[in-house]
Amino acid sequence: MNAQALRLEIQKLKTLPPLPQNRQRMLAAVNDPDVNIEWLGELLAECPSLTARLIGLANSAYFGRAGKIHTLKEAIVHLGLNMVKNMTTAVLLSESLKPGQCPAFQTERYWLNALLNAQLSQQLAFASKDQEMPEPAVAYTGGLLMQIGILALVCAQPDLMREILLEAGQSPASIRQMLQDHFETDQYQIGRWLILRWQLPEIYAKAVGAQSLALEQLNNKSKLALLLLVARRLSPIILDEEENENQIHQLSPLLNLPSPTIETIVAKLRKQKQLLQALARQFH
């Protein structure tokens, strides 16, 4: 199966339908920078399962209010508008792409990696003084979406992905190499197709798709694309608790951030790893 055939399979399979209209409205709303928080709350309240998930997320240990949030309004106030938008995006993706037919896929590790990518992207954007750097909330969403192609593949091609996962493990870098070797595509191109199909903002499609490029080519792309590259290079250091100062030194010039600044962000997220793992379980 070549890249074009794989793309067609993903697009036509019933496991990856267009989002229902109400979910499409919600995704459009959470990606609207000018959305009114009260109207957004009313829209999200139309979906009881989403409301329950958001209340559950707000009560997670990561957000520090375990058992104290009882209503969607309280959840929105506690999480803040930007985090509500990002958690809504994550919930809608997790509900629409269910990997149950591929037991080899480690869902918790996937979401932990996605949340780490999101947090790294956000923290790096906060730390940057570059005026062209995207808003931290945009960076967070980009991090969440970066590996969505893997989730799409697991849902659309569970047997194929079982073979790939058994050989490559859960590492996005190893999965990418196998997909490129066998199908002349990778999870970033598939993620780009899915983002465009679901009518998410084009900035995410371009930044995610750019992850397929070599560093020399990617360096000429958007700041969000560079931010995502640095995040995906840093996340294994946290996930696998590796000491890799050389990697940090190599990444530092890409965002014009001092190595100690990046090291501080990595150390902070290492301390939050268990809380992020607990948050990742909410997306099973």
Image (cartoon, rainbow, N blue to C red):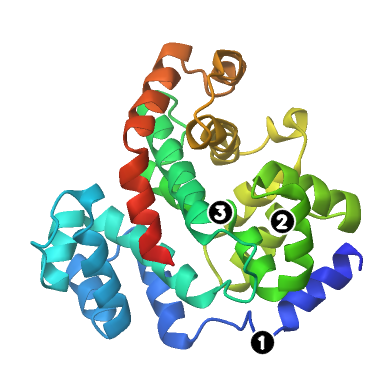
Question: At 61% from the left edge and 64% from the top edge, which residue is drawn?
Answer: 151
Question: At 50% from the left edge and 37% from the top edge, which residue is drawn?
Answer: 239
Residue 110 in view, yes or no? yes
Contact? badges 3 and 1 (CB < 8 Å): no
Left or right of residue 225: residue 262:
left
Secondary structure category for the residue under label 1 = loop
Distance between mark 3 and mark 1 Cα atoms = 24 Å
Secondary structure category for the residue under label 2 = helix
For the N terminus, the image quarter is bottom right
For the C terminus, the image quarter is bottom left
Return the x and y of residue 196 as percentages of the image width and height.
62, 67
Q: Is the residue marked by circle 3 packed among few (<14), some (14-19), or many (20+) residues within 10 Å?
A: many
Q: Which residue is mark 3?
A: 204
Q: Between tags 1 and 2, which lies in front?
A: 2
Q: Which mark is residue 14?
A: 1
Return the x and y of residue 92 as percentages of the image width and height.
43, 72
Q: Which mark is residue 65?
A: none
